[in-house]
Amino acid sequence: MIPRYSRPEMSDIWTPESKFRIWFEIEAHACDAQAALGVIPKEAAAAVWERGAFEVERIDEIERETRHDVIAFLTNLAEHVGPEARFVHQGMTSSDVLDTCFSVQLTRAADILLGDLDGLLAALKKRALEYAQTLTIGRSHGIHAEPTTFGLKLAGHYAEFARNKDRLIAARADIASCAISGAVGTFANIDPAVEAHVAKKLGLSVEPVSTQVIPRDRHAMFFATLGVIASSVERLAVEIRHLQRSEVREAEEYFSPGQKGSSAMPHKRNPVLTENITGLARIVRSHVGPALENVTLWHERDISHSSVERMIGPDGTITLDFMLARLTGVIEKLVVYPQNMKRNLDALGGLVHSQRILLALTQAGMSREDAYEAVQRNAMDVWRNGGDFLAALTADKAIAAHMTGGELAEFFDLGYHTRHVETIFARVFGED
């Protein structure tokens, strides 16, 4: 991933230095387990830890000749360890190193993403509580529907990201798998105790059945989870972009001193951060298809998945890390305009109360069909020509036969729509 959309902690997981360090730890821990079993001398295992080292440039140089990255690494490692290096990689195959390393990298990446989600959840909760009772118009199909509160809108996104956190926790557990089972996964030349030891040292679980590679359904679920989270990020980003439209102006991204919105028009305040997030969500989701296709490998294993994972592993996690951090910043600094929310809420002259009037008329004795026709007839006149919905209803003879103007006015109370806010908040945030 390009530096523009990268943050250091996540990027560091995917550097060649970090990857080869994990490879070294896998091999060294395996040597310890082999020594404990009496397969290799204890002095050899100690030598690997004491003298083990590598140089990325040297590994690349060797790989240009061998065309095999694990052999290149082991060759470079042997240059430092000396004669005892002949005991390294005993009974192992390349996938033992590659797959276990990838599991370590993805679990570390998941831990950072879980921290990102915690930060976003905290920001959403704070702003949701801040605007719990701030009335705004709820929309369906982009059209005014009924009143809600801005806090409730944010609470809905909080609940979604809380679900995403649970999904990522499960995906992390699923991907935290270690395979040190040798060629075709039968443990023919290595004891299962070695796998158990390496797994424990690296904080992984053992893969129950390996075909030499860890089954890729685990990885497919992991990247699918990243795709779902990216879509949730985009959903909130798109809502903010809608709210920032000039015709709406209910909320907008913070516009910092000295910031410029357009090279041509000095008045512009564009939602560039959330537009950026929307674009990056497409990148993360684009990784889901290849990850699903990686599940199917020829005759138990091949390396068609390898080239895919070398790209989607770093790009997917780095991009989502950046997106979550950016969205958290947007929410923390989001500029909210309650006065504009009230203006928009009143823009249709009270039409947002049409359902209450419909229900009230049915309670007063009108058939639902007649009540719907009467309310809609007056609503469409106000929609087209403007005016006051309550006044139009009061003047309607069919409606007046069932309800007085004063009785109708009681159903235009905005507080009616907020009376269950605390109940919903308790469901989302808990009783506290």
Image: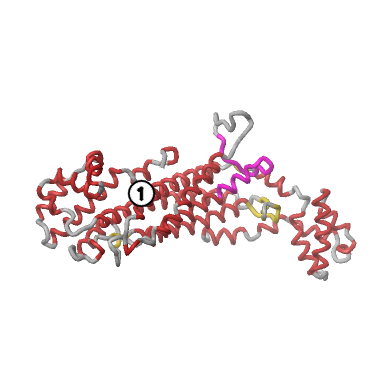
The verdict on residue 278 being magenta is: no
Q: Which residues are magenta?
A: 236-255
Which of the 4 quarters of the picture holds residue 400?
Answer: bottom right
Q: Residue at x 58, y 33 (%)?
A: 261
Q: Position of residue 283 (x, y in %)?
A: 47, 48
Q: Residue at x 78, y 50 (%)?
A: 349
Can you give x and y, in whole percent of width and height, for residue 432 in the image? 52, 58
In this rendered view, identify the residue nearer to me: 49 or 150: 49
Q: Is residue 362 rendered to the left or right of residue 108?
A: right
- The quadrant of the image that shows the N terminus is top left
Answer with left or right where residue 162 lies relative to residue 185.
right
Give the tally of numbered discs: 1
Q: Give the residue displayed 81% in from the left and 70% down from the top.
A: 367
- Residue 285 is left or right of residue 79, and the answer is right
Q: For the point 34% across and 43% down, which residue is it? A: 12
Q: Residues within 10 Å of mark 1 (few under 14, many from 20)?
A: few
Badge 1 marks a residue whose secondary structure is: helix
Q: Is residue 254 magenta?
A: yes
Compared to residue 322, the image places residue 229 above or below, namely below
The three-letter amino acid code for the residue at tag 1 is Arg
Which residue lies under the disc numbered 1?
A: 310
Q: Point out residue 225 in the picture as x, y percentages from the top left corner.
A: 45, 57
Q: Position of residue 105 (x, y in %)?
A: 33, 51
Q: Is 251 displayed left or right of 108 in the figure? A: right
Q: Is residue 147 above or below residue 278?
A: below
In front: 286, or 353?
286
Q: Is residue 283 visible?
A: yes
